[in-house]
Amino acid sequence: MLSTTGLPQGAVPKLERPGPLRDRVYEALLELITTRALQPGQHLVESELAGHLGVSRQPVREALQRLSTEGWVDLRPAQGAFVHEPTEEEADQLLTVRTLLEAEAARLAAANAGSAGITTLEELCAQGESAVDADDVDGAVALNARLHAKVMELAGNTVLAELAAQVDRRVRWYYTPVARQRGHQSWAEHRELIAAIADRDEQRATQVMRAHTEHTRKMYHEREK
């Protein structure tokens, strides 16, 4: 059984100040879970987490309670806290919803994006390709999230963006295990998407984004476990 002992060097984020300590501990733990520095099924020991983060056990306990409520952590009687292990059905449902949201965002971005926004997408795509070349999985995952967030921003629909933000962390969680496998193909699809947005081709942008997100969903289910 894995415990929190032995977190990868440099994996523990620095706690940002100011702000309530419990909130900062929550954000730090959620980042560790999202990036899979803390793996699904891993035992979360309060004293060890407190030591890693340089805090007392109380804010860690409060953060774990909140993470449990949100489905990131499982609290088991007489055993303790464990990172939630998502089922295939959970992943499928989340990634299906993501496809719906992202496809509509792509359509709206094609209708609304200006030249500055398109330039930003191209810059993010180039950075993502460089991260893949360097085998920087964490960097590629972060840049993937930033590019998709930019498309959502360019869509100009606040409600759509709020809904997408609710699933963004979990999308990153599911994407991380397949990021290396998706590799350059994912960024080639991004290039195709950006071209459709630049051409103001709403139908093509929708189709490309739907296919792009479906490729990720399919690969997640086919990944090596």
Image (cartoon, rainbow, N blue to C red):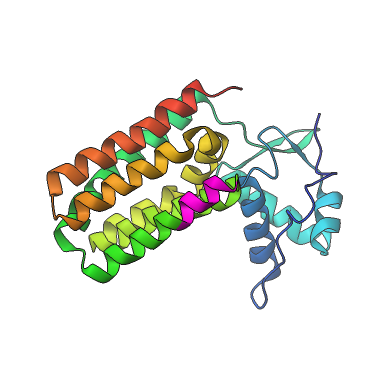
Q: Is residue 170 magenta?
A: no
* Figure check: 69 above or below 127: above
- Identify which residue is drawn at 29% across, 34% down: 211
Q: Nearer the viewer, residue 174 or 215?
A: 215
Which quarter of the rendered picture does the N terminus lie within?
Answer: top right
* Figure check: 207 above or below 14: above
In the picture provided, is 82 more to the left or to the right than 208? Answer: right
In the picture provided, is 82 more to the left or to the right than 136? Answer: right
- Identify which residue is drawn at 50% across, 39% down: 175
In the picture provided, is 113 more to the left or to the right than 66? Answer: left
Q: Which residues are magenta?
A: 127-134
Could you say where residue 125 lies in the image, as x and y percent from the top left?
40, 54
Could you say where residue 171 lies in the image, as x and y percent from the top left?
46, 43
Could you say where residue 71 lies in the image, as x and y percent from the top left?
56, 41
* Figure check: 68 above or below 128: above
Could you say where residue 103 lies in the image, as x and y percent from the top left?
25, 44
Which quarter of the rendered picture does the C terminus lie within?
Answer: top right
